[in-house]
Image (spheres, helix red, strand yellow):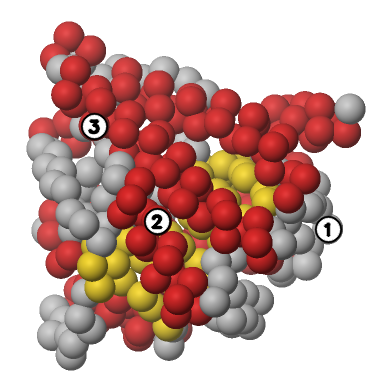
Amino acid sequence: MWLLHWKAFVLTYEFYQPSSIPIQAHTLDQTIVNRQSSIVNRQSMNTSLLNQQSVLVTGAGRGFGAGIAVGMAQAGAKVCITDINAEELQQTVAEIEAAGGEVLPLVADVTDFAAMQKVVAQIVDGWGRLDTVVCNAAIMPLIPFTETTPELWSKIIGVTMTGVYNTVKAAWDQMVAQGGGHCMAIASGASVRGFFDEVAYCTAKHGLEGFSKALAMEAEPVNIAFNTIGPGKRIKPTNITRAEYDALSAEERAAWVDPVELAPAFVWLAAQPSSRFTGLRFDAGPLADTIAAEGYDFEFAPEKVTVYVADFVERLKRRDE
């Protein structure tokens, strides 16, 4: 099992205050150059769909968050990316700039509400508004319940669930003032099932579904949409760093989809009127496949946008009640 295979990776987590990262000339190794070339040459994005919109993606130093951020920039958005790892964040900056995007990198810790308020303030100061928030930051150390200390429990819940609250809460007043916006949180299989060695992580991901359902009800009158969206395909485990990923063989890396290929799903959802969908669970895999086959203006059907069709339909029915 790949989950057990990656159990050996040790997670480190440090705390930072938000600060702008100086954007300097980048010396890139061949792996990054190849990835940038792949990003630039990818033709699936509509480069004007999010024209001049501003987007915040947390946990964007690597993996899913980095791919989402690059995809949003390719679609014309101005993208603020945050992470606690300044070095990895700079690599995402390089990828976005290679794709011709505008980016604001900020080192910030999602567990610090005041820090996220400062992030939002910097976005609004620079771009005048905040249209979409993608709450991607999470940590997932694979560890049995018996070895989960109170400190580690608090850290996993704090980043993966409370971090979403902090980010959305920090953006809330601005979105209300500007007439609405989109908030998205990352879902996964752990949102609906239990897994060995993931008690705290599963708790956080299950909790986000409840958060989404309840907040969507309060957010709808002020034209703010809140949805969750899972990868829908196998992606690199959260705790693998860029350096660790680059050290893997091509065969090992091939087991996971490039997260940039899933980014059209986030672009599509961010481009919808915020009154159209809220309180729902989407999945990027089937949604991106639909876009690739039919374009961004595809005829909507639940089976085209989620793995969990029955749940999606049930939530739509409850919204109409």
User: From the viewer's perspective, is the residue at label 1 or at label 3 nearer?
Assistant: 3
User: From the viewer's perspective, is the residue at label 2 or at label 3 nearer?
Assistant: 2
Callout 3 amino acid:
Lys
Crowd tier of the residue under label 3, counting other residues whose Cα lies within 10 Å: few below 14, some 14–19, many 20 or above: some
**Callout 3: helix, strand or loop?**
helix
Whole-percent x, y for residue 154 in the image: 25, 26
| N-terminal-most mark, 1 or 2 | 2
Whole-percent x, y for residue 250 in the image: 23, 59
Q: State the separation of the CA atoms marked 1 and 2.
A: 38 Å
Callout 1 amino acid:
Glu
In the image as oriented, which residue stretches furthest toward the right?
321
Q: Give above or below for 191 relative to 10.
A: above
Q: Quadrant of residue 215?
A: top right
Where is the N terminus found, in terms of image quarters? top left
Q: Give above or below for 193 relative to 92.
A: above
Q: Quadrant of residue 87?
A: bottom left
Mark 1 highlights which residue? 299
Q: Residue 64, which numbered label?
A: none
Residue at point 21%, 57% (across, down):
17
Q: Is residue 277 visible?
A: no
Mark 3 highlights which residue? 155
Q: Residue 117, which numbered label?
A: 2
Residue at point 23%, 12% (across, down):
145
Callout 2 amino acid:
Gln
Q: Judge from the rendering whether residue 19 lies leftward or rightward of residue 191; answer left or right.
A: left
Whole-percent x, y for residue 297 in the image: 78, 67
Whole-percent x, y for residue 12 in the image: 12, 42
